[in-house]
Each structure stands twice: as C-alpha cells, then as structure tokens.
Amino acid sequence: MIQDFLRYLETEKRSAPLTIKWYAADLKNFEAYLNDLSPQESIDGVSKAVIRSYIVHLSKSKLSPRSVNRKITSIRAYFRYLEQRQLISSNPSSTIKSLKTSKKIPDFIPENLLETLQTEIPVYFPDLRDYLIFEILYQTGMRRAEICQLKDQSIDFEASLIKVSGKRNKERLIPFTNKLSNLMKYYREQRETFFGSSSFDSFIVSNKAGICYPQLIKRAVESRVESISGKLKISPHTLRHTFATHLLNNGADLIAIKELLGHSSLEATQIYIHNTIAHLKKIHQQAHPLG
C-alpha cells in the first residue's frame, strides 16, 4: 500500500522527487518500527496509541523535533490517503499533534561577505558551471530542485524572465539582470564548445553532459565556497535565504518577495523579517551616537 501512496504522490499530486524520497524513507522507518513491535502488525491497521508510541520512540532518539515532525507529516499524509480511498474506516493520525519547535531564523550571507565570493568568471567549463549555479541561486532565489528542472527554453532572454516550475508544478516567472543574462549566454556557448553539441536535456549539465541532479547543485555551491574560504558552510538553500533577506533589507515589498520565492502563503515569507530586524539593530548600534 505504501508503493500505491508513493505513486499517487508522483502521478496525481506531482510532488517533487525529493519529497517522495523523504516520504518513502519515513514510512519505511515507521514500518520497521511496527515489525519490531509486532511482526503481525500492519501499517494500514495501526492504532493512535501505536503512532504515539512511535513518536515517543523518536523523541528519545537523537532526532531533532523538526525531524520528528517531518516523520509525523509523512504518517499523516499516508493515513489521509488511505482514508480518502476508503481503505480505513477512521484515521488514527487525525489528532496526532506535532512537537513544539523553536522558530529558526534562516541563515544568510552578509552582503559584504558575498562580494568576496563573486570573483572573476572561470574559464574551465565545470568551474564556470559551478560559478553560474551559485549566481542563479543567489540572484533568483530558486530552490535546488527548481534549478535542476530548468531547460534552455525556460529562459526568455528577450524578456529577461525565467519560467520556474515549483512545488506541485506551480509555475512562476522570475526576472534576471543583464549581468546574469550575459553569464548564462556565455555558459551556453561554452557548454556547446566543451561538449560539441547544441542539444541538452537540462540547462545545467553534469561533467558528462548528463541531466542536472540535486547533489550536483549541492557540490557546486560547496566547491565554489571552498575555493574562496574553507571556513564557510553554505548550502543551496542558504543562497535562497540570502536572496530574500537582501531584497527585504534593500526595501523590497514582502508580497513581491513571496511571489518571487513561490511561497503559497505570506506566513512562510515573514520569517525573513527577523533577519531584517537584526540588520536594522546592527545599523542602529553602529550609527547612533549612543549605540
């Protein structure tokens, strides 16, 4: 039944591959717990008490509350699916509550530090690609999965717009600067020269001209940062946070940032206000005579 649920996520919900991967892992972990508890116990017939005992088991492990909550989300989604398909008479997860977590302020790169990461454009193609990945993530705020899905035809150079397919295949348009436009055109030319071809399955390609994949994006950002400073720890999502925070710090409207990020609600975007307040406090302390 779990496989049917995963197919439903892929074909009907059109969930991102990474999302499906996490759901699969979470449900298999839950199933393994049930087998240890009672080999005869079926995941489709568990009670509310068993789910609660699993949460207690997770809480006693070294997992953070956020990680436990993600597993709770996966379990809830699975039982909702079973209930909608009338495969169970009642949903045992309907009243299961998430653990309390502290609000985490997103990490971002200060503007002055970011300038040190924007060095001369590399000549060697793989280095050029990694440089471009870093710039696209910072200048557009795309998610890692979104940049992987980019095709050449996703980019409208005349209108200076990138068409992005976000979560649940929700499309949005992101504008880009002349600087990024020139960099993407240069990358495209060098890609054709390097591989001797003009046809590619994704805009960003691997070292062997294969399609882009999430781990490639992660490694590109890490290698880009390590080439400048081995002390910095920056992920692709850090650049998304940096994009939003810098826009807000420089006067951008919160609703506009919401649309650029592809958030479904304004609440998800409001986390960046905390970074802006921290920025204003720093300015106040530096600039005020009694700061």
Image: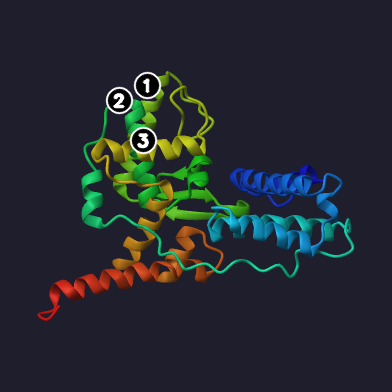
| Number of numbered tags placed on the structure image | 3
Circle 1 packing at 10 Å, graded few (<14), some (14-19), many (20+), is few
x and y percentages locating residue 114 in the rendered image: 26, 50
x and y percentages locating residue 180 in the rendered image: 33, 45
x and y percentages locating residue 42 in the rendered image: 84, 49
Work out whether residue 132 can be spotted. Answer: yes
Query: Mark 2 and 3 residues: CB-CB less than 8 Å, in contact?
Result: no
Give, as a three-letter code, the residue at label 2: Tyr
Quarter-of-image position of residue 28: top right
Q: Mark 3 = which residue?
A: 130
Q: Nearer the viewer, mark 1 or mark 2?
A: 2
| Element under disc 1 | helix
* Pick the front one: 198 or 22: 22
Vertical side of 282 occupied by 212: above or below: above
Q: Mark 1 = which residue?
A: 193
Vertical side of 232 occupied by 93: above or below: below
Give, as a three-letter code, the residue at label 1: Thr
* Pick the front one: 107 or 115: 107
| Element under disc 2 | loop
First reached walking from the N terminus: tag 1 or tag 2: 2
Question: Residue, x 86% and y 55% (percent of image)?
Answer: 45
Circle 2 packing at 10 Å, graded few (<14), some (14-19), many (20+), is few
